[in-house]
Image (cartoon, grey):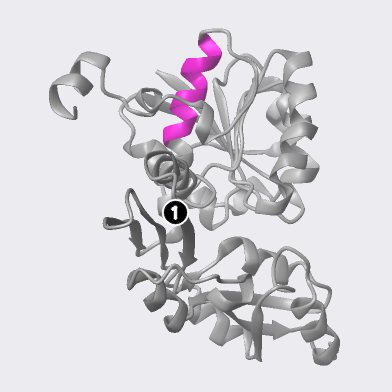
């Protein structure tokens, strides 16, 4: 059995908890939280500990599944955890992935541990599609659209702003751009051409709404390059919206093999629950990291580095017999 630790218990932590519980080859050693453990009521009856107790579980956990946010949690905490544990995380600030990779590689190599970073559906599953589609159709253009749906990372980034009580952010593809790609027009699309970001924000009493709106719209890597709408609403309204964390998106490769023959490759996801699906991807890569680490692999890997067979609980013989 693969022994797993879950670090953080928000929406993503809940999704990971459900996925680990459904995995026949995994055992949860515990959920580790910064909150008072007695205040956490997990979806599955796994033990809950303070994150400060993690050190005493060194050698007892094959892989930690990290459920913190990309804005501050993962950049601040992953390196420290990687000194003693193998880790999997969902760091999703695309522009900062190379920097994040480099910051962890030295730590992992020095300590003989293994980290899988930027695991989820984008980056993650969509990254694999972009690589595969580009490899088999080299003469063409890539297009990625997200939504309509709730972006956990962007919502978390808004909630980190001083004066914000709660927030949720929806990513919405622009129909004109999406239709042009589907029609095979190979349009030249800038970041702002493809998506609209709409935010619903509840603020603390007395907070400067104008300043908060400006902070959101100017936030690099999150909102600065997009048309962004900020709506100020009550905390109760945000909580109602947070009950349905759906998302999804599309990866396209549009191109030609000859002047006469055009091709459109598409992968689409429609997700009722973004955190539950992301948690399922993290859990599958947790299996892969545990296996690779057992074989002596150390350092940092992404979805490009992990053979797909390591994700599955099926044996190599079963994979060849049933899925090939």
Q: Is residue 289 magenta?
A: yes
The image quadrant of residue 267 is bottom left
Q: Is residue 78 visible?
A: yes
Q: What kind of element bears circle 1?
A: strand
Residue at far front of view: 259
At a point 53% along the width and 27% down the height, the residue shown is 305
Q: Is residue 146 magenta?
A: no
Residue 186 relative to residue 313: left or right: right
Work out whether 96 lies above or below 295: below
Question: Quadrant where the C terminus lies?
Answer: top left
Rendering coords of residue 93 (x, y %): 67, 54
Residue 167 relative to residue 161: left or right: left
The residue range painted magenta reads 284-294
Q: Main secondary structure of the magenta part?
A: helix
Rendering coords of residue 210 (x, y %): 82, 91
Rendering coords of residue 237 (x, y %): 55, 87
Q: Nearer the viewer, residue 257 or 82?
A: 257
At a point 51% along the width and 32% down the height, the residue shown is 304
At a point 57% along the width and 21% down the height, the residue shown is 61
Question: Quadrant where the N terminus lies?
Answer: top left
Q: Nearer the viewer, residue 268 or 68?
A: 268
In the rendered image, which residue does mark 1 sit on? 140
The image quadrant of residue 219 is bottom right
Q: Is residue 45 visible?
A: no
Q: Residues within 10 Å of mark 1 (few under 14, many from 20)?
A: some
Residue at far left of view: 321
Rendering coords of residue 195 (x, y %): 55, 76
What number of labels is visible?
1
């Amino acid at each position: 059995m693969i022994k797993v630790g879950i670090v953080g218990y928000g929406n993503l932590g809940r999704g990971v908890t459900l996925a680990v519980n459904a995995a026949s080859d995994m055992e949860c050693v515990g959920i580790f939280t910064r909150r008072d453990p007695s205040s956490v009521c997990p979806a599955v009856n796994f033990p809950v500990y303070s994150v400060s107790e993690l050190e005493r579980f060194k050698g007892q956990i094959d892989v930690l599944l990290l459920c913190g946010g990309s804005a501050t949690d993962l950049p601040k905490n992953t390196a420290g955890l990687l000194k003693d544990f193998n880790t999997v995380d969902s760091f999703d600030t695309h522009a900062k992935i190379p920097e994040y990779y480099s910051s962890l590689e030295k730590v992992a190599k020095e300590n003989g541990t293994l980290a899988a970073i930027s695991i989820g559906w984008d980056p993650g599953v969509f990254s694999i599609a972009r690589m595969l589609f580009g490899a088999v159709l080299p003469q063409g253009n890539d297009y990625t659209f997200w939504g309509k749906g709730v972006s956990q990372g962007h919502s978390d980034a808004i909630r980190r702003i001083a004066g914000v009580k709660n927030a949720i952010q929806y990513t919405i593809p622009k129909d004109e751009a999406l239709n042009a790609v589907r029609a095979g027009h190979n349009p030249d699309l800038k970041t702002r051409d493809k998506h609209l970001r709409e935010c619903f924000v509840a603020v603390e009493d007395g907070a400067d709404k104008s300043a908060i709106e400006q902070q959101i719209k100017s936030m690099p890597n999150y909102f600065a390059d997009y048309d962004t709408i900020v709506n100020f609403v009550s905390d109760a309204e945000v909580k109602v919206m947070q009950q349905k964390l759906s998302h999804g998106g599309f990866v396209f490769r549009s191109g030609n093999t000859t002047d006469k023959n055009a091709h459109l490759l598409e992968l689409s996801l429609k997700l009722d629950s973004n955190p539950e699906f992301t948690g399922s991807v993290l859990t599958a890569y947790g299996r892969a990291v545990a296996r690779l680490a057992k074989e002596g692999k150390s350092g940092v890997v992404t979805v490009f580095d992990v053979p797909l067979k390591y994700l599955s609980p099926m044996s190599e013989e079963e994979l060849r017999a049933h899925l090939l």
